[in-house]
């Protein structure tokens, strides 16, 4: 098993609903750039109008891997863009009530079901505040990516610290992702936010090591996770 760890810097403002390549009404192109050079800072700072944001949300981007049947280190930038878009859509879903197309990011049905229940639970928790305190944008801090080679074509581990800026106030969380190449596309195979008292912290457990890309294929673990979700839903009613 081979591992390669890379530190990347992406310090900047990520506007909710942005994409990496957007054309505005004046035919000017706003491009989000993420650099793999750890010696320089890179930023995402894309401003969009409400009409453009609506078009972006209707798109279903495909995150294509660079090689057939495996992940390589050079997939890191695309994986990062996918994870950032997933976080944007996730926080908009739980705070603003927006739709999220999990099929864009997740192929595994067990993980998809877990995320659907999680999103509904978090939206129900926040719904009384959504009219006056919606998510405006995200700040992405210094992020990490680690490549691991295995018999299934390898996987990427990404760790993204995020500040969620709302109409009033903000808060921070760190989310960890595992990404694989499935049928030529990069997909998220695990997604964990371990902030104290967060949903994953309470349901999956605290201080977990996120390093098993096959965990959502393990039937006993999935059944245990489903039971914990049911227990958590009952305790919050």
Image (spheres, rainbow, N blue to C red):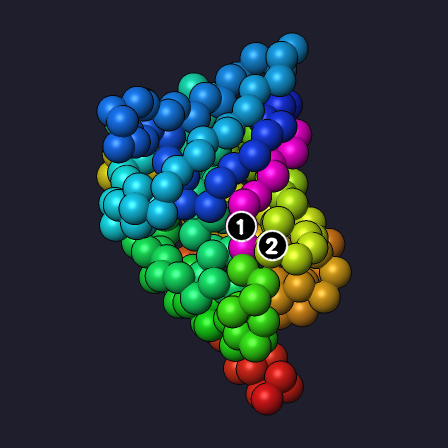
Above or below — where is 191 with respect to 94?
above
Work out whether mark 2 precedes mark 1 in sequence or the reverse, and give the earlier one.
1
Instruction: From the viewer's side, name the closer residue of 188 and 101.
Output: 101
Q: Quadrant of residue 115?
A: bottom left
Task: Report helix, strand or loop for mark 2.
Answer: strand
Q: Which residue is mark 2?
A: 166
Asked whether 187 falls inside the magenta stretch, the response is no
Label 2 close to label 1 by CB (< 8 Å)? yes
Q: Which mark is residue 207?
A: none
* Residue at (60% x, 54% y) in the render: 166
* Residue at (53% x, 68% y) in the render: 130
* Residue at (62% x, 66% y) in the render: 199
| Image side of residue 229 versus residue 152, left or right | right
Q: Quadrant of the C terminus?
A: bottom right
| Image side of residue 174 versus residue 191, left or right | right
Above or below — where is 55 with respect to 22?
below
Q: CA distance from mark 2 to mark 1?
A: 5 Å
| Image side of residue 47 versus residue 62, left or right | right
Q: Quadrant of residue 122?
A: bottom right
Q: Quadrant of residue 53?
A: top left
Q: Which residue is mark 1?
A: 136
Report the number of discs.
2
What segment is highlighted magenta in the picture? 135-142
Q: Is residue 224 visible?
A: no
Q: Is residue 9 visible?
A: yes
Task: Report helix, strand or loop for mark 1.
Answer: strand
Residue 87 place in picture, x, y as percent: 49, 48
Main SS of the magenta part reads strand
């Amino acid at each position: 098993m081979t591992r390669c760890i890379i530190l990347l810097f992406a310090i900047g403002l990520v506007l909710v609903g942005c994409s990496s390549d957007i054309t505005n009404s004046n035919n000017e192109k706003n491009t989000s750039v993420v650099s793999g050079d750890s010696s320089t800072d890179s930023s995402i700072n894309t401003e969009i109008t409400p009409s453009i944001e609506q078009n972006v949300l209707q798109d279903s981007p495909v995150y294509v891997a660079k090689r057939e049947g495996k992940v390589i280190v050079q997939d890191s930038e695309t994986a990062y863009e996918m994870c950032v878009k997933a976080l944007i859509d996730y926080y908009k879903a739980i705070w603003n009530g927006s739709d999220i197309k999990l099929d864009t990011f997740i192929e595994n049905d067990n993980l998809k079901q877990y995320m659907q229940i999680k999103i509904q639970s978090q939206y129900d928790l926040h719904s009384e505040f959504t009219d006056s305190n919606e998510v405006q944008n995200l700040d992405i801090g210094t992020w990490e990516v680690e490549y691991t080679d295995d018999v299934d074509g390898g996987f990427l581990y990404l760790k993204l610290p995020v500040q969620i800026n709302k109409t009033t106030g903000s808060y921070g969380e760190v989310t960890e992702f595992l990404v694989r190449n499935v049928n030529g596309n990069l997909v998220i195979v695990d997604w964990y936010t371990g902030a104290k008292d967060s949903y994953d912290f309470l349901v999956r457990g605290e201080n977990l090591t996120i390093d098993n890309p096959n965990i959502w294929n393990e039937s006993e673990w999935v059944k245990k996770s489903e039971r914990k979700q049911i227990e958590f839903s009952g305790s919050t009613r």
